[in-house]
Image: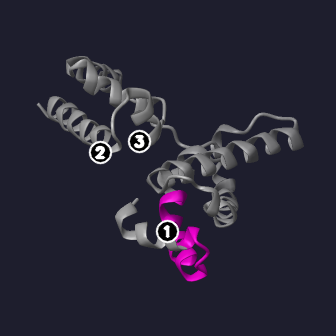
């Protein structure tokens, strides 16, 4: 998602600007739909996206870190997909037929091995920031507190760690 494109709009929407909120929702819709296609039953995709956008419009003011907007958005739609699946199971008392389950593309074992090897190749301080951010989902501020670093130092370290991991994976 183009966070840079909507970052000013995010701030304005969070402050209550209705037009900015509309732009944020419009810009987020396609990415949410694409993400929902992997997590929702086919018949529930549009419902999950609509419910997610409605929730975002009501709760955006509560979002503390704009940097976490994208992951927050995707967590909302995934939670909505799971809620709809549970509701379908409760209503019908049956498992969801395979024909309408989302398409899941399995990750090749080699990818997991490559990512694990890339993480292992990193110096410990770089590996730690990647794991804290991407595995544990901590914000930059939470990482800074935990690592006793400035916010800028954490961002710099995370950027360098990702560059090194990307370099390792591309070789």
* Residue in the image at 33% along x and 33% along y: 149
Q: Which residues are magenta?
A: 13-33
Quadrant location of the N terminus in the rendered image: bottom left
Q: Which label is found at residue 11? A: 1
Q: Which label is found at residue 101? A: none
Callout in the foreground (3, 2): 2
* Residue in the image at 29% along x and 24% along y: 127
Quadrant location of the C terminus in the rendered image: top left
CA gap, disc 1 to disc 2? 20 Å
Q: Which label is found at residue 152? A: 2
Check if residue 66 falls in the magenta segment. Answer: no
Q: Residue furthest bottom?
A: 19
The disc, 3 or 2, on the residue closer to the chain's N-terminal end is 3
Q: Residues within 10 Å of mark 2 (few under 14, many from 20)?
A: few
Give residue 43's position: percent from left, percent from top. Answer: 68, 55
- 135 or 91: nearer the viewer: 135
Q: Secondary structure at mark 2?
A: helix
């Amino acid at each position: 998602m183009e966070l840079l494109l909507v970052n000013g709009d995010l701030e304005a929407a969070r402050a209550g600007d209705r037009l900015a909120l509309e732009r944020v929702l419009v810009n987020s819709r396609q990415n949410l739909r694409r993400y929902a296609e992997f997590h929702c039953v086919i018949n529930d995709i549009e419902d999950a996206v609509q419910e997610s956008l409605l929730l975002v419009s009501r709760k955006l003011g509560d979002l503390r870190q704009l940097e976490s907007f994208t992951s927050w958005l995707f967590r909302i739609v995934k939670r909505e997909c799971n809620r709809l699946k549970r509701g379908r199971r409760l209503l019908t008392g049956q498992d969801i037929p395979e024909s309408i389950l989302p398409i899941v593309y399995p990750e090749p074992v080699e990818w997991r091995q490559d990512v694990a090897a890339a993480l292992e190749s990193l110096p410990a301080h770089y590996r730690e920031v990647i794991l804290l951010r991407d595995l544990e989902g901590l914000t930059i501020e939470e990482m800074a507190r935990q690592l006793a670093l400035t916010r800028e130092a954490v961002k710099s370290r995370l950027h360098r760690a990702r560059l090194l991991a990307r370099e390792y994976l591309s070789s």
